[in-house]
Image (tube, helix red, strand yellow):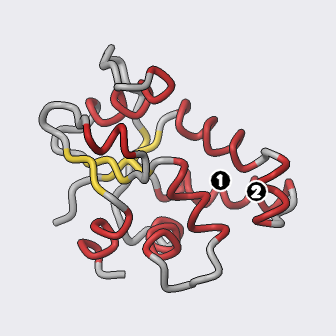
Amino acid sequence: MLKPAVVDTNIIIAGLITTDADSPTAGILDSMLKGEIPYLMSEELLFEYASVLRRPKLVNLHQLTETEIDTLLAEIVVNALWREPDSTEEAPDTGDNHLWRLLASQAGSILVTGDRLLAENPPAAHAVISARRYADLIGC
């Protein structure tokens, strides 16, 4: 059985803007939308997804309308394991504290990210892995 994942925003964005439908990030995003993998979500992570998806530079790349962004976010939330983290975990970059806190809300959960700083400094008792490694684990 797969451990629940925390999917960093950079994986979602990469999955949307890639031109390679077989890329690891596209496979992860598709698996999330189909409810095929367990993943954790919090209010703070959802807010980050929403705000990053609406950045003008990224809108020019993914070409989603406001309605399409809202639909995408709703589909992500529907399949997520919702958590309300209450820990005070600190990430190597304080802008990512919400990821560490979400990881702490579920024993054995893993972070999927392209952020090298996070990958090189994982929190105790949790793995931080690349999109490629996670895609291999889930078979996409």
Q: Which residue is mark 1?
A: 73
> What residue is at 48 percent from the left and 59 percent from the top?
79
Q: Residue at x 29, y 81 (%)?
A: 139
Residue found at the very far top of the displayed protein: 88
| Quadrant in which the N terminus is drawn | bottom left
Within-10-Å neighbours for mark 1: few <14, some 14–19, many 20+ = some
Out of 45 and 134, give the one closest to the viewer.
134
Can you say whether 16 is above or below 122 in the image? below
- Disc 1 to disc 2: CB gap under 8 Å: yes
Secondary structure beneath dot 2 equals helix
| Foreground residue among 64 and 91 | 91
Rate crowding at label 2 as few (under 14), some (14 to 19) or many (20 or more) other CA atoms within 10 Å.
some
| Spot occupied by residue 114 in the image (x, y as percentages of width and height) | 43, 53
Q: Position of residue 80 (x, y in %)?
A: 45, 52
Counting every numbered tag in the picture gives 2
Q: Amino acid at mark 2?
A: Ile
Mark 1 lies on a secondary structure that is: helix
Q: Quadrant of the C terminus?
A: bottom left
Residue 36 marker: none
Q: Amino acid at mark 1?
A: Leu
| Drawn side of residue 49 relative to residue 134, left or right | right
Q: Position of residue 67 (x, y in %)?
A: 84, 57
In this picture, is 98 found above or below 111? above
Q: Residue at x 34, y 39 (%)?
A: 118
In this rendered view, identify the residue nearer to me: 118 or 33: 118
Q: Which residue is mark 2?
A: 69
Task: Find residue 47 and report its image quarter.
Answer: top right
Q: Position of residue 92 (x, y in %)?
A: 35, 25
Question: What separation in Å lies between label 1 and label 2 (alpha carbons)?
Answer: 6 Å
